[in-house]
Image (spheres, rainbow, N blue to C red):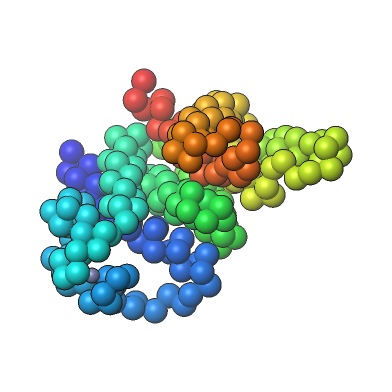
Amino acid sequence: MGLMVILGLLGAAMGSFAALVAERLVRGEPFVAARSRCLSCDTPLGARDLVPLLSWPLLRGRCRHCGAAIPPVLWQAEILGAAMGMAAACAAPDPARALLLALWMWSLLALAIADLRWFRLPEPLMACAAILGLALALAGDGSGWPGLSMRASTAILGAAVGGGVFWAVREGYFRLTGREGMALGDVFMLATLGLALGPARLPMVVLFAAATTLVLALMRAQRKGRAMRRLGRVPFGAALALSGVLVAILPAMA
Ligand SMILES: [Zn+2]
C-alpha cells in the first residue's frame, strides 16, 4: 500500500518529466532546467501552478495571468504516469522490481507522447526503454525460475521475433506497393517490447495496438470530418508502447 502511494506520486512527477523529455528530444533542445513559462504571456509559472495532478484542474486549464488555455497534455501525462507507478507496485513482487517496472513504463510513456504529438520515436528514449526492458527480463519475478540464461534467451528471442516479423511486414508492403506502410520506428518498438515481454506475449501487444489505432483513427476522422482512408499517418508506435504496458501488468490484474 505504501509502495503504491510512493510510486503513484513519483509517477505523477515522472509523467510530466516524460512529456518534457519527449518535447526536448523532438525539438532538439538542451536539457537545461529552464523555468516553465506560459506560452501566451511568458509569465514564469510559480510553484502552485506546477503541482502535479492538481494544478491543471484547479486552474480550469487556464493561465492564472492571461487566461490562455494550457494544453492538458502535461496533466494527462501525470495521470498516466501515476497510474503506471501504482500498477507497477501491484504487479511486481518486491519494491526494487516494482521501481524497475515503473521506470520501463515511464520510458514507454515518453515514447508514446512523442509519437502522439509529433509522430516521432526518439532514439535515445528507445534505447532507454530497451535497456530497462532487458533489465526487467533479466531480473525475473524473484522466484529464480526460469534461470538467468533462460530469461536472457527469452528476451533476445522476443526482440528478434518482434523486430523480425515487423521488418518482414514493412519490407513486404514496400515491395508490393512501392510505398512505406510502416515506420522503421515501429519495427524497433516491437523489438524493444519483445526484450521485456518475450515472444509469447507479442501477438497480444500487436492485437491491442491494432485495436487502439483503429479507435484513435476513427476518433481523428470524426473530429476532422474526413474519410478514414485519407487520414494518412496513425500513431501506431504510441499504441504499441501503451499496449506493451498493458500486457506487462495484465497477469497481475487477472
Ligand atoms: Zn499566460
Residue 213 screen position, x and y as percent: 53, 34
Q: Quadrant of ligand 1?
A: bottom left
Q: Is residue 197 above or below residue 59?
A: above
Residue visible at 46% across and 61% down?
22
Residue 13 screen position, x and y as percent: 28, 57
Is residue 242 shown to the viewer in this render?
yes
Quadrant location of the C terminus in the rendered image: top left
Q: Nearer the viewer, residue 68 or 89?
A: 68
Choose top left, top right, bottom left or bottom right for residue 101.
top left
Q: Nearer the viewer, residue 240 or 197?
A: 240
Q: Is residue 160 left or right of residue 66?
A: right
The number of numbered badges drawn on the structure is 0
Residue visible at 50% across and 31% down?
218
Is residue 248 shown to the viewer in this render?
no
Residue 243 screen position, x and y as percent: 48, 35
Residue visible at 43% across and 49% down?
109
Hey, which residue is sitting farthest right in the picture?
175
Q: Is residue 210 above or below residue 51?
A: above
